[in-house]
């Protein structure tokens, strides 16, 4: 059985989850806000959404990749916590905290780009 979760190569998605689970977010990552969505279906939907977001973007352009960051982060968080989380009072602060961490950690831009490349040109199963 194959998994449709975004995993494998870059560990950045797990890192996003770790940052978002830090105390003060007010939402536990293991508690789905939308329990009606099947995990595999949710993962396929996330991969499709992210692939669509990056399909026409030149990943060799630093500026283009930087402009993708917030929409990609937002989509990953909303997939993890449910679409309703965008209305949560801590959503904007969480986005800012993740973006700041991306700016501070010198490994993150490379890992983010690796995630985007993997989504744009997935490896065969």
Image (cartoon, rainbow, N blue to C red):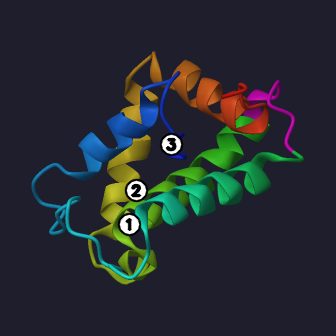
Q: Is residue 18 left or right of residue 63?
A: left
Structural distance between the alpha carbons of marks 3 and 1: 30 Å
30 relative to 105, above or below: below
Q: Are marks 3 and 1 in contact (CB under 8 Å)?
A: no
Structural distance between the alpha carbons of marks 1 and 2: 5 Å
Q: Secondary structure at mark 1?
A: helix
Q: Are marks 1 and 2 in contact (CB under 8 Å)?
A: yes
125 relative to 56, above or below: above
Residue closer to the observer: 7 or 57: 7
Residue 60 on the magenta span: yes
Badge 3 or badge 1: first in the primary sequence: 3
Q: Residues within 10 Å of mark 3 (few under 14, many from 20)?
A: few
Taking the view exactly as shown, the residue that stands out farthest to the left is: 23
The part of the image, by quadrant, that contains residue 117 is: top right
The tag on residue 95 is 2
Q: Is residue 16 left or right of residue 51?
A: left
Residue closer to the observer: 79 or 110: 79
Q: Nearer the viewer, mark 3 or mark 2?
A: 3
User: What residue appears at the point 59 percent right and 52 percent down from the top-left corner?
Assistant: 72
Residue denoted by label 3? 3
Instruction: Measuring from the top left, give residue 86's x and y in whole percent.
Output: 42, 76
Q: Secondary structure at mark 2?
A: helix
Residue closer to the observer: 119 or 42: 42
Per the rendered image, the range of residues in magenta is: 57-63
Instruction: Measuring from the top left, give residue 48's x and y in whole percent.
Output: 70, 57
Residue closer to the observer: 39 or 33: 39
Q: Residues within 10 Å of mark 1 (few under 14, many from 20)?
A: some
The tag on residue 92 is 1
Main SS of the magenta segment?
Answer: loop
Badge 3 or badge 2: first in the primary sequence: 3
Instruction: Measuring from the top left, give residue 90's x and y in whole percent.
Output: 27, 70
């Amino acid at each position: 059985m194959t998994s449709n979760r975004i995993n494998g190569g870059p560990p950045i998605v797990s890192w996003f989850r770790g940052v978002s689970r830090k105390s003060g977010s007010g939402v536990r990552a293991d508690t789905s806000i939308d329990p009606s969505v099947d995990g595999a279906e949710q993962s396929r939907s996330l991969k499709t959404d992210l692939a669509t977001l990056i399909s026409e973007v030149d990943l060799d352009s630093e500026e283009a990749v930087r402009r993708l960051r917030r929409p990609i982060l937002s989509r990953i968080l909303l997939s993890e916590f449910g679409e309703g989380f965008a209305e949560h009072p801590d959503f904007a602060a969480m986005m800012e905290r993740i973006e700041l961490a991306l700016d501070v950690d010198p490994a993150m831009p490379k890992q983010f780009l690796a995630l985007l490349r993997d989504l744009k040109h997935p490896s065969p199963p």
